[in-house]
Image (cartoon, grey):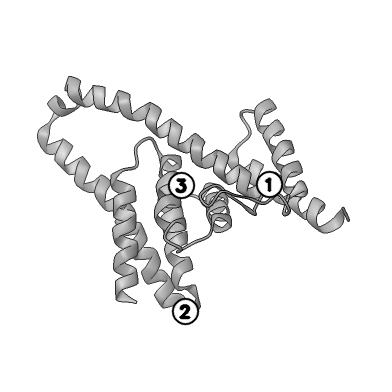
């Protein structure tokens, strides 16, 4: 158990260290570290994103906390809280250390042309990573049996209902851009209950 805690702490420390551009920028790193490492599934990642977005606090911290708890929930609340503490500490510690370093270096660091040029290079890379993972999660939601890594193009599990929800919610977010994420998530949940639970198709 100690090794699992240490591994989770180290994974989220790396995620926190290399996350630039806000909470959504950490999703590609979480997918690579945790989904790729077998700690969570792609479906679980989608659920964690929704929960983290709809609860108070920063998305990055919420996601780390929920994932940490999920790894030990079968062992009791005490171990679940310990897991949450390890992942949350891991994801916030790099930012704390970097802020202390920047504060000690003063404004010259932020005014440096090299630093500004580095951030200009990071922005498009972060956007590209987010788009890549978003497309992958959309494909997984609609076609769960497709695996691009193993070149397994199995279309048998086509999730038509999920695609309907995706199109409706996507349309709503395009036409109502000021709609809060919480309302979008609640709207999606209601759609899910209607389409999956009440409509027999």
Q: Earlier in the sequence, mark 2 or mark 1?
A: 2
Give residue 60's position: percent from left, percent from top.
42, 48
Q: Is residue 25 above or below residue 152?
A: above
Viewport quadrant of the N terminus: bottom left
Local packing at callout 2 (Cα closer than 10 Å; few below 14, some 14-19, many 20+) is: few
Q: Name the spot of residue 42 as percent of width and height, x first.
A: 54, 55
Label 3: how many Cα within 10 Å (few below 14, some 14–19, many 20+): many
From this viewpoint, which residue is outermost toward the top? 113
Question: Distance from label 2 to label 1 (Cα)?
Answer: 34 Å
Q: How many marks?
A: 3
| Residue under label 1 | 142
| Residue 187 in picture, x, y percent from top left | 71, 44
Residue mark closest to the camera, 1 vs 3: 1
User: Which comes before the other along the chain, label 1 or label 3?
Assistant: 3
Secondary element at image label 2: loop
3 or 2: tag closer to the N-terminus? 3
Residue pointed to by mark 2:
76
Q: Nearer the viewer, residue 18 or 84?
A: 18
Of 104 and 40, nearer the camera is 40
């Amino acid at each position: 158990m100690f090794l699992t805690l240490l591994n989770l702490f180290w994974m989220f420390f790396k995620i926190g260290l290399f996350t630039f551009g806000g909470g959504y920028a950490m999703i590609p790193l979480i997918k690579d570290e945790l989904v790729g490492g077998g700690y969570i599934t792609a479906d679980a990642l989608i659920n964690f994103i929704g929960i983290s977005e709809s609860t108070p606090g920063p998305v990055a911290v919420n996601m780390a906390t929920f994932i940490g708890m999920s790894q030990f929930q079968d062992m009791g609340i005490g171990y679940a809280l310990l897991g949450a503490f390890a992942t949350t500490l891991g994801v916030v510690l790099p930012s704390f250390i970097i802020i202390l370093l920047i504060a000690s270096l003063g404004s010259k660091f932020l005014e440096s042309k090299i630093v500004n040029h580095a951030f200009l290079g990071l922005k498009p890379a972060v956007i590209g990573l987010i788009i890549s993972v978003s497309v992958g999660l959309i494909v997984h939601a609609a076609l769960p049996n497709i695996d691009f890594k193993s070149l397994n193009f199995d279309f048998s599990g086509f999730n038509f209902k999920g695609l309907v929800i995706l199109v409706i919610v996507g349309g709503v977010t395009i036409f109502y851009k000021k709609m809060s994420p919480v309302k979008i998530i609640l709207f999606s949940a209601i759609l899910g209950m209607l389409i999956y639970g009440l409509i027999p198709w």
